[in-house]
Image: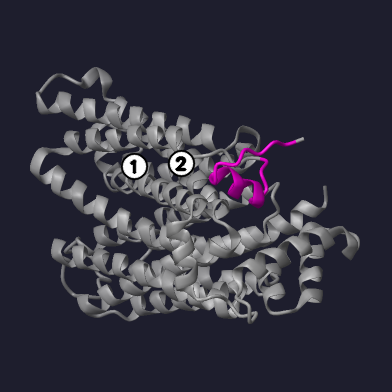
Amino acid sequence: MHWRYNEFLAGAAANFATVSVGCGIAWPSPIFQKLSDSNLQDNPFGKVLSERDKMWSEMGLAVGGLAGPLLACWITKHKGPRIALLLSSVLHIAGSLLFMIVGSVSLLILARTIIGFANGYVLLAVTLYIGEIASDHYRGALGCYIQIGTTLGILIVYCAGPFVSYLALQAICCAVPILFGTLFLYMPETPHYLVQRGQSQRAIETLVFLRGARHADEVKPELEEIKQYVKRRDGDDGLPAPTIHHLKHLLTRRGHKKALLISLGLVMFQQCSGIDIILANSELLFVESNASLGPVYGTIVLGVLQFLSSCLTPFFIERTGRRPILLASSIGLANALATLGTYFVLIRFTIPVESVRWLPLTALVGFVVLFNAGFGPVAWAVVMEIFAHELKPIGVTSCVLGSVLFDYVILQLITVLITAAGIDWAFWMLASICAAAGLFCWLFVIETRALNLIEIQKRLSGVKTVRL
């Protein structure tokens, strides 16, 4: 079984880029708390950040996240997924360096916009790279690496943020993309891009490396499949077909429309499940449960649980399939959120809760574990494999854009709802969304386990696939 290690090595190296994404997501947790402290000595702004300043910086993150995937799609198409991923390290380094020299709120907003741009860029570039190097057998497991990298970045910031200075945390965040760029320099270009460029011999060498084959004949059948994929993606002149051509196919053909519906639905429910709201209110939940760890150490433990639970999924996704994990995760998330909603309803009506003080923390842990072992990684694994190869760039770009947009919208809606009606109503709303996610998975999501990319397209188009 030697061959699998090179494939997983390349996938792990590529997904190290998502560690910077996690750092960008978790950055406000310790930094905003520091910059809200009037006694902080190393505040680069010389004043306490207002809620308006924080809101604008997070809006910058969302705006950047919408623009990043568009550039990543263009570079991937014309320069290759490997070069596109390497360039992502430059974006994250630039954002981190700008954080080090900021002296005004406007520069802070600009820095967060660059980080958001880099995050959206990385999500697309990683998804396309993994989709083009993964074999059918380990496609799902490699697709789960995105969540592992992201939760590792979150954990790094949770562990370092409260205990180091503002500048030291920016230096740590800057070191991550430098390390990624150094490691990824040794990884190969995808065989699909090499075939597209007419470099069949290099494509064979890459496949031999990724599959651990002893000689070229072992990968010749896969090379022929790739040539057929590239032929369908390219125009008659051998150049990549116009994006509008692929967009038309994506929106008009039955199988492609269903792939888009499933993918957008999964990323919408993933972002609207409330993971960011839960993490943002984790300190409140630790206080409510009278946890002995306290908010700082409790958040670190939460980060550890996120990372460890996300590491579990690659070990069983190919055994259980995608659909059962999504269904079970949706039901579990809905129950955890409903439990939190019930607890805060009791507090609203001043019903004694001393005997169940442990309940919010238990629900919080259950929610985080279920999300990071289920809906979080598996949704992206399905997105990575469900589009026809020639439509993968534009299909995945649509999903990354949708992910950024849905995340920002749900954060704003829930913030307004908490202010207007209370946190209990927010949790009940999120529980309803997760229940709807389970229904969506039951009605629309197809099982892709043990199917190759051609069989997936046939199933999406309504053609039954029979495996011998």
- Is 153 in the magenta? no
Q: Where does the image place residue 128, in percent across and percent down from the top left?
A: 56, 63
Q: Amino acid at mark 2?
A: Phe
Q: Are marks 1 and 2 in contact (CB under 8 Å)?
A: yes
Closest to the observer, 276 or 259? 259
Q: Report the span colored magenta.
A: 450-467
The dot on residue 375 is: 2
Residue 305 in view of the camera:
no
Q: Where does the image place residue 327, in percent across and percent down from the top left?
A: 46, 32
Q: Secondary structure at mark 2?
A: helix
Pointer 1: what residue?
Answer: 273
The residue sitting at 19% across, 30% down in the picture is 344
Q: Where does the image place residue 342, in percent across and percent down from the top left?
A: 22, 25
Q: Amino acid at mark 1?
A: Ser
Name the quadrant containing residue 436: top left
Q: CA distance from mark 1 to mark 2?
A: 9 Å
